[in-house]
Image (cartoon, helix red, strand yellow):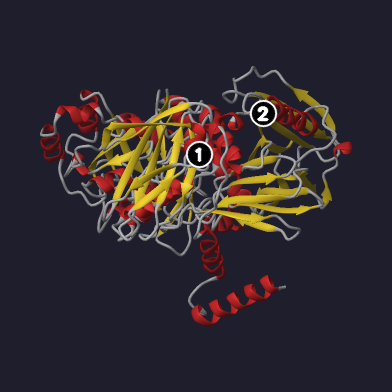
């Protein structure tokens, strides 16, 4: 009762103080930020406990068999046909298990459960994959009209609408990328009978929340991932020891045309049995690294050098003259040149040229291929920025789109959306961008997305799709995946950089195809707390995704060490701190196990510390950030996830001659006490088992 009264007072205070300024969404984000302010605390866990065991593998396999196989007694998905809820007894069941192990998804065995309803001329196909060595499974549901006429209306189409017998549970989830210092903050809530709801914002899937959830229950834990690059929705509640979960495209109510097919979001579940949620986080990270990331992704480290930003006016000759003056040793540690927006013709700024994907001849008289060829001569690749889904008035895509019905979706804005849901527009789009990438010598395709799509999809539903709610979004998102797969199928080794206004498309389906070189637009400009925020972003996003990147803003040690992460951007024309990595030894440990040690957010008066270790716990690093306003003269850091009986050698990279020896137990229980200097300091500890 006291908690309820306090909550009511907080709401009243907020309304009185900030009323009329903030939306409910902003108020909700404000409350979540308060919840995340002090961070979530985690208990110590040994290296042995962290490993996936046979009991957990069996738990996953049994759940998969009971829910997603041909012998399943019930299904975790559901939908309605003309208001009648799906009942498996009304459908004929078939199974196609012909896919070879790993042929569809790396590390997984995929089968196809086919359910036919002759009365309704509908067919539901469940693509279900078990990852036996990762204690994980995933599925997607497809519904197709196999008849000659329009189908009945499909509604309430849930990819997941079931309960997990977790026992009483805590729910861990993270804020999304909202261009704020608090991006990716982790929040812990006790599950109750009151439903907790999560969703995208205006069709941007990860602006408000990340679609990843760690349910840590008394019986077992489950990490749930959602793949839907649109407006998804998920709910969680707990009743009688069962965690109730729903996942769906938030709005879909539509009949299907003959031969038409729709799909659900992709849902994944990783199972674990431990009271420490860190096990769930790390098993999920390992599955993402082992089975989800594209095979051509360098999972250790990746370094880019920016050669042209969105306001660059330099010509090819001027850029090459600068690059000729850079020490050859820099190129040995650089993977790609990076050219951002604005390489095409535009009027007042890079934004109003979006839709014309040809190089500005006044600056690049020999085309982009001259620069990508220069990069190839140096033995490195080339990143080039595109935002092809957004079309500005007067551009090439705009003029082409106007010549065809339904190729462009217009609103009152001067920005139109290219309608990927239209099959002819989709084919033109695929072929045009593929040819552009090849012509420009692109090895890393940087795809951006800087607007909210939901109003375009809803308008298209009314104008192009007979008022069928959610149908444009469903086909658009499906074809977005087909498009990205088409590019990688036709350009060997192509890497896709998933930008989307900095981290607004970090769902599971995009993770299967891409990595975010630029995880938050908070790094687009300088802020007083920028370096602290960069540290906090790494701290928060690392619970879920091992690979992500951002920018180095300033040539000093604290800044460069704040930007230590597996994928990152070197400063403009490599004007970086001479030590910057170049921290490769630390970066190459960051796809292993992750242990948050001390959360300080972006607060300059608090410490922040995090640890990354190999999965066998034999090697690791601790990144410890002493912020400017921390007044303590010493700091004790306790490591985690080690083998208690092993002897570990530990040293500070700034004092490599001083090597200390501790047992894993001592490092986890007693820790190491460090002397802190005045002002900012980033301390890097390295440790290894002797």
Nearer to me, 510 or 416: 510
Q: Mark 1 points at which residue?
A: 668
Disc 1: CA contacts within 10 A as few (<14), some (14-19) or many (>=20): many
Badge 2 marks a residue whose secondary structure is strand
Mark 1 or 2: in front is: 1
- Which residue sits furthest bottom? 16
Q: Residue at x 21, y 41 (%)?
A: 576
SS state under label 1: helix
Nearer-the-camera pick, 72 or 9: 9
| Residue 415: numbered disc | none
How far apart marks 1 and 2 lie (CA) works out to 37 Å
| Residue 51 sits above or below residue 322 on the image | above
| Count of number-bearing discs | 2
From the image, tell me which residue sits under label 2. 129
Is 260 in front, or is 330? 330
Q: Is residue 438 left or right of residue 221?
A: left
Q: In this view, does 628 lie to the left or right of 254?
A: left
Residue 537 against residue 55 in the figure, above or below = below
Q: Using a 10 Å C-alpha cutoff, classify the residue at mark 2 as few (fewer than 14 neighbours), some (14 to 19) or many (20 or more).
A: many
Give whichever of discs 1 and 2 has the lower sequence position.
Answer: 2
């Amino acid at each position: 009762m006291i908690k309820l009264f306090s909550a009511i007072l907080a709401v009243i205070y907020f309304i009185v103080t900030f009323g009329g300024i903030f939306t409910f969404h902003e108020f909700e984000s404000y409350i979540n930020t308060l919840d995340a302010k002090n961070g979530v605390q985690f208990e110590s866990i040994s290296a042995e406990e962290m490993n996936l065991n046979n009991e957990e593998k069996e738990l996953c396999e049994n759940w998969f068999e009971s829910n997603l196989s041909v012998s399943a007694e019930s299904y975790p998905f559901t939908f309605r046909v003309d208001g009648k809820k799906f009942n498996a007894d009304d459908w004929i069941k078939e199974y196609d298990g012909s896919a070879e192990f790993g042929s569809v998804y790396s590390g997984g065995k995929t089968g196809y459960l086919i359910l036919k309803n002759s009365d309704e001329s509908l067919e539901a196909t469940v693509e279900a994959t078990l990852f036996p060595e990762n204690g994980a499974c995933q599925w997607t549901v497809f519904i197709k009209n196999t008849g000659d006429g329009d189908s009945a209306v499909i509604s309430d189409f849930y990819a997941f609408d079931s309960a997990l017998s977790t026992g009483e549970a805590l729910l861990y989830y993270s804020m999304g990328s909202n261009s704020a210092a608090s991006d990716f903050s982790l929040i812990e809530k006790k599950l109750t009978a009151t439903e907790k709801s999560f969703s995208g914002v205006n069709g941007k899937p990860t602006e408000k929340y990340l679609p990843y959830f760690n349910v840590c229950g008394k019986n077992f834990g489950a990490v749930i991932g959602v793949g839907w690059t649109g407006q998804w929705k998920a709910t969680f509640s707990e009743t009688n020891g069962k965690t109730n979960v729903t996942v769906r495209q938030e709005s879909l109510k539509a009949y299907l045309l003959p031969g038409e097919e729709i799909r659900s979001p992709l849902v994944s579940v990783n199972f674990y049995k431990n009271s420490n949620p860190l096990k769930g986080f790390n098993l999920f990270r390992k599955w993402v690294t082992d089975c989800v990331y594209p095979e051509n992704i360098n999972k250790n480290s990746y370094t880019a050098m920016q050669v042209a930003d969105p306001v660059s006016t330099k010509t090819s000759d001027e850029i090459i003259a600068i690059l000729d003056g850079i020490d050859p040793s820099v190129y040995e540690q650089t993977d790609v040149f990076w050219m951002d927006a604005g390489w095409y013709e535009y009027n007042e700024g890079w934004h109003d040229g979006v839709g014309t994907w040809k190089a500005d001849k006044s600056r690049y008289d020999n085309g982009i291929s001259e620069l990508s060829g220069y990069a190839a001569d140096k033995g490195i690749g080339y990143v080039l920025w595109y935002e092809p889904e957004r079309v500005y008035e007067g551009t090439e895509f705009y003029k082409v789109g106007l010549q065809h019905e339904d190729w462009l979706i217009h609103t009152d804005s001067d920005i139109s959306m290219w309608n990927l849901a239209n099959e002819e527009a989709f084919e033109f789009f695929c072929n045009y961008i593929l040819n552009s990438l090849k012509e420009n010598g692109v090895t890393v395709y940087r795809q951006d997305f800087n607007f909210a799509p939901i109003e375009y999809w809803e308008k298209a539903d009314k104008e192009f799709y007979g008022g069928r709610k959610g149908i444009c979004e469903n086909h658009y998102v499906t074809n977005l995946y087909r498009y990205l797969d088409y590019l990688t199928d036709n350009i060997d080794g192509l890497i896709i950089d998933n930008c989307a206004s900095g981290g607004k498309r970090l769902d599971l389906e995009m993770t299967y195809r891409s990595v975010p070189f630029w995880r938050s637009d908070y790094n687009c400009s300088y802020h007083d707390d920028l370096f602290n925020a960069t540290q906090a972003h790494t701290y928060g996003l690392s619970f879920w995704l091992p690979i992500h990147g951002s920018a180095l803003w300033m040539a000093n040690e604290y800044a460069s060490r704040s930007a230590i992460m597996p994928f990152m951007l070197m400063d403009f024309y490599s004007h970086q701190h001479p030590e910057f990595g170049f921290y490769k030894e630390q970066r190459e440990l960051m796809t292993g196990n992750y242990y948050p040690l001390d959360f300080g957010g972006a607060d300059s008066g608090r410490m922040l510390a995090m640890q990354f270790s190999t999965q066998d716990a034999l090697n690791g690093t601790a990144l410890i950030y002493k912020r400017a306003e921390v007044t303590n003269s010493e700091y004790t850091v306790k490591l985690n996830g080690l083998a208690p009986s092993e002897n570990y050698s530990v040293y500070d990279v700034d004092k490599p001659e001083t090597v200390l020896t501790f047992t894993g137990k001592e490092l986890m229980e007693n820790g190491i006490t460090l002397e802190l200097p005045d002002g900012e300091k980033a301390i890097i500890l390295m440790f290894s088992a002797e």
